[in-house]
Structures are given as structure tokens and as C-alpha cells.
Image (cartoon, grey):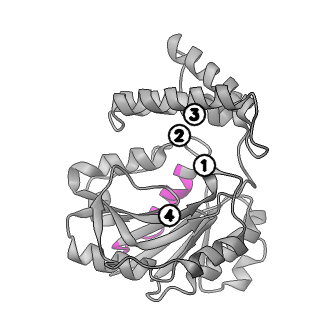
Amino acid sequence: MNITIGIATRGRPAILGEVLAEIDRQTRPPQAVIICHVSEGDVTGLPSRFPGLRFITAEAGLPRQRNAIIDAAPTADAILFIDDDFLAAPDWLGVLEAVLKAHPDCVVATGTVIADGAKGPGISVEEGRAILAADTLPSDPLAVAPHFNGYGCNMAFRMAPIRQHALRFDEALPAYAWYEDIDFSRRLLPHGSILRLAGARGVHLGAKIGRQPGRRLGYSQVVNSVYLARKGSYPWDHALRSIGRHLLANAVKSLRPEPEVDRWGRFQGNLRGLWHVLTGQAHPGRIVEM
């Protein structure tokens, strides 16, 4: 199979370099690695360090950059999108290829994240590599289970249905595009299955470099959920639970926030989003006003 790795990046050249070094350790190498950046500073020193990779540019925004990667890979049978702070275990692509061959109905495959720094203060590259080295593969590395969506830091797509139905990442979701992974995965569900792969493993560092202000994230937590529910790619019960969960967490934790999280900013963004929903002003693109 022609399997391409796609990475949308901005503002993290040092960490991206470590991610690319880990890709070199894949036991089943990709046919291509495409890095989509916004400015030259996003990939400082990397084209010369990794001359065999493709570096392309696009306007800022995760959906725009991922769509540019899709356009740049017209012959790929599958594209694995990983974040620019995701360390993939060496067997990731080997497991993916075996699963896609064994399950021809699989259109979305998401890996097993054994440690996720996005849910805490973050994980250093050294810590991430140590976690990978200590990890033990499951007894059946090709085991799969149905899953709700692909997790954006490591999700692969079979490209035939994407091309057949002209599917694109939704560019109305700007910046880091909260829940763009859910939206794209669920729009593929009518054409096949979404599977979680037990043996495709990795560490999401959750780097805090290049993060958006808390107000923008808080706004997106509310408005993007409503936008996708109205669009039909995200069930309303999931959307309402998500809004309530984040609103409560940000309100309570803003009293004693974690050092690495702008809880008060997120809570302010939540409230602005709720007001815009109630007054008919809500749209994901309005985070630029935050």
C-alpha cells in the first residue's frame, strides 16, 4: 500500500525535528512524509536535515493545512495524520497496513495513545521516548475495536472514499480547529468503519508551545460543538455533554488553575460562546475576535 504521513505544523521546529527522527525508526517506512507549514520559521533547519521529505506551505489553520496535504498526495492509498508533537512507536505503520488489508471496510483508523501530555503539563521528548521504550505491545497487536472517531494527534484515513465523495476538512473551523477530527471521522462513517488499533501506539507530548489563548479555546469548546451538531456530524447529546463538561471544569478549576492552563481565559471564552449561541451570533471563525 502507498501510505503517506502528513504533519501540519506551526511554530515548533525543534519538537517537529524529534518527531521526524522517530518516523525514521518505522519498521514499515512510509512512501512519503509531507510537512505542511505556514512560514519558513516553522521548519527552520529541517529541510536540510531531512532531505527526503516534502515541505509544502498553506495558509494558517489545521484544516487548511491538512487539506493541502491531501491535495499533495494524489496517489496515496492511506494518509496517517500525526501532530507535530506525536512520537509514533516503530510498528505504527506496519500495524496500520496489516489492519487496512484485513479490514477493507475500515475507513478511519486511530491509534492507542499510551500517554497524553495534552491532558496535563505536557511530556518532554526525553520522557516520551522513555515511555515508548518501556511500553509492552498487547498480546494481539492487530486487535481492533470500533471507535467513535479518530483522535487528531494520530489518525489514518483510507483515501478512496475521501476522493470518491470529495470530502475535505472543514475550513470554517479556524486555527487548531477544535473537534475537526470528530467532524471528519464522522462524515466518513457512512462509507465504512472507524477502528481503534491496539498495536499502533504512541505518545502525544501535548507541547504548550504555539498554543492559542485560553479565550479562543473556551469559545471553540462551546461554539464548535454547536456548529458540528447543527451540521449533523456530531450528535446533539454528545455536543451538550461536551459543553457542560468543559464549562463546569473551567469554572471550578479557574479558582485554583493548573500552572500550564489558562482556565479563567477558557471560562471567559465559554461564556462568550454561550452568549453568541443564545443570540444567534455564534460561528467558529469568531475566535479571531477573542
Q: Which residue is mark 4?
A: 113
Q: Nearer the viewer, residue 236 or 172?
A: 236
Q: Which residue is mark 3?
A: 220
Q: Quadrant of residue 4?
A: bottom left
Q: On the rendered image, what quadrant is the N terminus found in? A: bottom left
Mark 2 and mark 1 in contact? Answer it, CB < 8 Å: yes
Q: Which residue is mark 1?
A: 61
- The magenta segment is 63-77
**Image height check: is 95 above or below 259?**
below
Q: Nearer the viewer, mark 2 or mark 3?
A: 3
Q: Which residue is mark 2?
A: 173
Amino acid carrying mark 1 in the image = Gly
Mark 2 and mark 3 in contact? Answer it, CB < 8 Å: yes
Question: In x, y percent, where is residue 228?
Answer: 41, 34
Estimate the spatial distance between the alpha carbons at disc 3 and disc 1, rounded to whole Å. Answer: 14 Å
**Image height check: is 221 above or below 10?**
above
Name the residue rendered at 42%, 31% in the picture.
239
Estimate the spatial distance between the alpha carbons at disc 2 and disc 1, rounded to whole Å. Answer: 8 Å
